[in-house]
Amino acid sequence: MDNFMMNSFPDNIKKELEAIQRLIMPIAKKTSKYMIWTFPLIGISVLNIAYLLFFTPWDSNMYIYLGIYATLGALGFALLKETRLNKKEIEQIGVKYMIERIKKSRFVSDERKRQYIQMVKQKPVSAMENFVKFLQEEDRIGRRFDMDDRTDEK
């Protein structure tokens, strides 16, 4: 998550978001390295294959070049597929962490926990937003419990 956005959250939410980041960081780094190579490999191979097929005369060396560019393109597409799989894995790790964290809450009722878990599972795209809402609700309820405990002690 963007550092600018992270700074706008309270400490308890930052802590949870940083925990998610620590879990997904190794896969995210690998995925970003793959993405750097994916589109140049695909672009170079497609452009060169098109150039070889439509703008150059046929000769015996052309098959070698076609094979090389086809291999580069295949490698690029394989990396693209791997990045898509890694993104799904990152999403699953994040959602799993969120669900486990929601289940562990002491302050939020079981019904609200089920609602948040359902929202996180049904809409993984907005899972982070729903998780932050959960953490805000938990913090609000937790502060109320703390205040009630202090008034009981007096």
Image (spheres, helix red, strand yellow):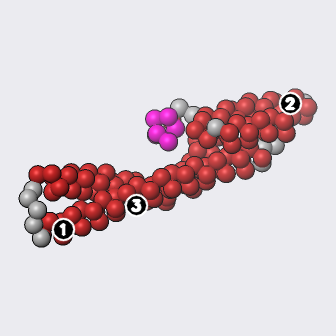
Q: Nearer the viewer, mark 3 or mark 1?
A: 1
Q: Mark 1 = which residue?
A: 63
Residue at 79 percent across and 39 percent down: it is 113
Give the structural element (helix, strand or loop) at label 1: helix
Q: Is residue 47 depicted above or below 10 in this figure? A: below
Where residue 116 sits, quadrant-wise, is top right
Please indicate whether residue 34 sits to the left or right of residue 60 in the image: right
Residue 29 vs residue 86, the one in the foreground? 86
- Is residue 14 among what the camera can see? yes
Question: The residue under label 2 is which amino acid type?
Answer: Asp
Distance of mark 3 from mark 1, alpha carbons? 22 Å
Q: Is 74 inside the magenta-drawn segment? A: no
- What number is the disc on residue 25? none
Question: The residue under label 1 is which amino acid type?
Answer: Tyr
* Spot occupied by residue 90 in the image (x, y as percentages of width and height): 55, 52
Where residue 80 sits, quadrant-wise, is bottom left
* Spot occupied by residue 122 in the image (x, y as percentages of width and height): 68, 39
Q: Mark 3 = which residue?
A: 78
Give the structural element (helix, strand or loop) at label 2: helix
Question: The residue under label 3 is which amino acid type?
Answer: Ala
- Is residue 10 among what the camera can see? no
Distance of mark 3 from mark 2, alpha carbons? 58 Å
Residue at 24 percent across and 56 percent down: it is 45
Q: Mark 2 = which residue?
A: 148
